Amino acid sequence: MKVKRSTGLFAGLLLVAALVVAACSQPTPAPKDARLTGTITVAGSTTRAGALQRSEGAGHLAALLATWQLDESLTDFVPGELVVRFVEPAGGLAPMSVQAAGGRLDFVREVGASGSGLYRLPSGLSGQLAVDPISATLATARELNARPDVLYAHPNYLFHAMATPNDEYYSYQWHYDQIGMEAAWDITKGSSSVVVGVVDSGILYSSTVAANRHPDFAPSRMLPGYDFITDPASAMDGNGRDSDPFDSVIDGSFHGSHVAGTIGAATNNGTGVAGVDWNAKIFSARALGKGGSGTFVDIVDAMLWSAGYTVTGAPVNANPADVINMSLGGQGTCFPDLQAAIDLVSMHTIVVVAAGNDNMNAGNFTPASCGGVITVGATDYSGDRAPYSNYGSRIDVMAPGGNTGVDFNGDGFSDGVLSLVYSTDIGDWDYAFYQGTSMAAPHVAGVIALMKALNPDLDTAGALAALRTTAHKLSGSACEGYGTSEPRTLGPDDCGAGLIDAAAALAYVRDGTVTPIAGDLAFDPAVLDFGSTVDIVTFEITNTGSTAVDWTLYGFLDAEDNPAAVPGGDGGALYMVSGYPYSGTLAAGASVITALEVDRSALTAEGQYQVHLLFTVDGVDYVGPPARFTKLRDSAAVTGPTVVEANIAVNGQWMVSGAQQSAGLLTSYDFRAAPGLTIVGAWIDVNANSTIDTGDYLGFHDQLVTVEAGKSYTLPIEVSPYFEGGDTRWPAEWLEALGGGATTE
């Protein structure tokens, strides 16, 4: 790594409100003006510019929106249904119908948090939809994606429960011994103030019919949930969405009940099985139906509702989840709508997801590959990676998922995870051994619920630090296990930080433990996660020893599953940031803050990367914490005459207080402007016709700035695509701040 002055990052949600560059005359200059400087970036591009800063936002969505492309190899979806997001719908609402070559698409409902809508081709249509519904749906998606007023369109993908179901009590729950649950329960058995949401197939606990309640779900701990399955045929309960998330799919695995039972089955009640958390409240957001499948749209709504966000047609969730478990997924990297929902949800809720059961790299599965989630792989009775478990650098930790094909412990039952189901054979409530990363994830969700009982303010980063720092690293051979689907041998990092230790993780949270990683050096956060858009991450290094130590950060070590080598030295991708220390002497108990920066343009292939930082401590080499980052497909180059203007309100009219123009693309600006409450915006006239129209790029600095005479301001601007007929008004709250009199019309 080399020292390089940071250029920072300006990330955030894709800007869809457009800017009017006012055709007004320059006001009379004030006696003394101000200096405005900044950078202009295209939404989602990998251009690095601006002043040094640490990004604090979700940061994942902008790049996804700018680079996402329809993957026509993914055909597991609802035929005739499409999720469409328009660049800027009229009045902020998606149109009630959309005309396409394959017929008229009718609006069904809004989708999640991103402003997109679910559309459906009318049933009974003749032609290609009836002959080949998969191809017809993809063709319509392809057509819509080519339209300038459409940001993206994709099918309503199906997701599936990530378990391999098979076919009674605590002594058979070997999986709890594996992660030290008895010692953990000596620290805490949980709190009734913690809420866990299970987005899954529903649970065997009806909110309306008392007879439809598994006896190992304690009524005092079950909160009202909701059934988000839209299709009655999939829900198999006689209707679509309703207030009872009872799992009525008698030909299914009762997957959600099995998952919820691991998290919080009634414990110490003399019957059935134990749950990881004895006291947390649980609710079900039902999204998987017949065959263990659920649509993308239903799952996104279930997750948002679980976190307390408003979902059209559903009652407000009065008990938002502290932890959400999602033991489901499908192939493909994270979808923009799902990432948008996760970005919202993870602000207040810790999301735990299953890595997947295909013995493949978890980076190619969703939601395992999404940012802001804790991704869990599975181990078997021996503590090795289970033969089905996905792997790779996107794995955070491992937990018991079982293997129903063996009986290594010799108890007469298969070595699966034991939890709650309904037996169609005996026609009664029952228990069963299942295997899968679906079974591993709820172990982690349950342990996080116990952590929240100790520290209600625990967030995703804190939970990851506790879990990863205290986990038991799998050896390379244990992670390799039964082999893989790709021609390489797995190493320890392909199973993340390793197998969780519940007792140690709880002690970490209770005691504020700081665990050294490199010699006497401990790190916070435990994972330097740059995601897909964050350029700079700061972290704290603490000397946990009793004497002073000399330390140096001198390089990094590539993960074996990186898409390409991470270059170092000149032209490298990972940089030390000037002004921060990378060596020195730390007194006992002392800490220092430093930072690293990623230049994704130096990476030669798209995908997810992980490196481990390398340190010397008192002359001894150590492997430090992991840093991970994603390179997305570069956006197409944007060029054209550029105008940057500062605007202030004078007597109820917008007036230009300063400006800079260029015949070619501007990536930075520097001009003088009159003082006042100011909006700064930029317009790239891509077709050079001096008219703001479809294909141009518009944007503004993301807040009003009170510009004072004689001072300098650095105000970055992100521009995004404009389409003809789009809204050209300033945000209403800005107009209100300016007195409500200013207008752009």
Image (tube, grey):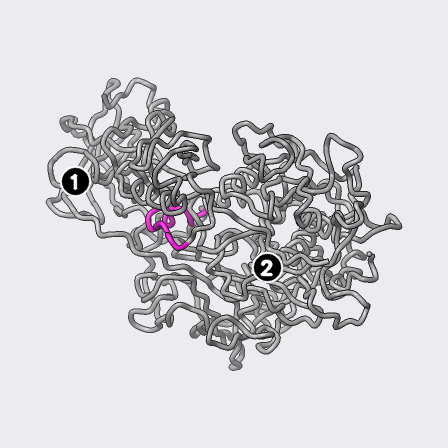
Residue topped by disc 2: 376
| 121 is higher (above) or lower (below) than 48 | above
Q: Position of residue 700 (x, y in %)?
A: 29, 37
Q: Position of residue 737 (x, y in %)?
A: 36, 24
Is residue 458 shown left or right of residue 186? left
Judge by depth and name the residue closer to the eye, 189 or 132: 132
Cα gap from disc 1 to disc 2, whole angstroms: 47 Å
> Mark 1 is on which residue type?
Asp
User: What's the magenta region?
Assistant: 58-73
Camera-side residue: 292 or 631? Answer: 292
Quarter of the rendering occupied by the N terminus:
bottom left
Q: Tag 2 or tag 1, which sits nearer the N-term?
A: 2
Q: Quadrant of residue 396?
A: bottom right
Crowding near the residue tagged with mark 1, few <14, some 14–19, many ≥20 C-alpha atoms within 10 Å: many
Q: Secondary structure at mark 2?
A: strand
Q: Looking at the picture, how far across and down is residue 636, in whole percent? A: 24, 52
Whether residue 712 is visible: no
Q: Is residue 519 above or below residue 744?
A: below
Disc 1 marks which residue?
685
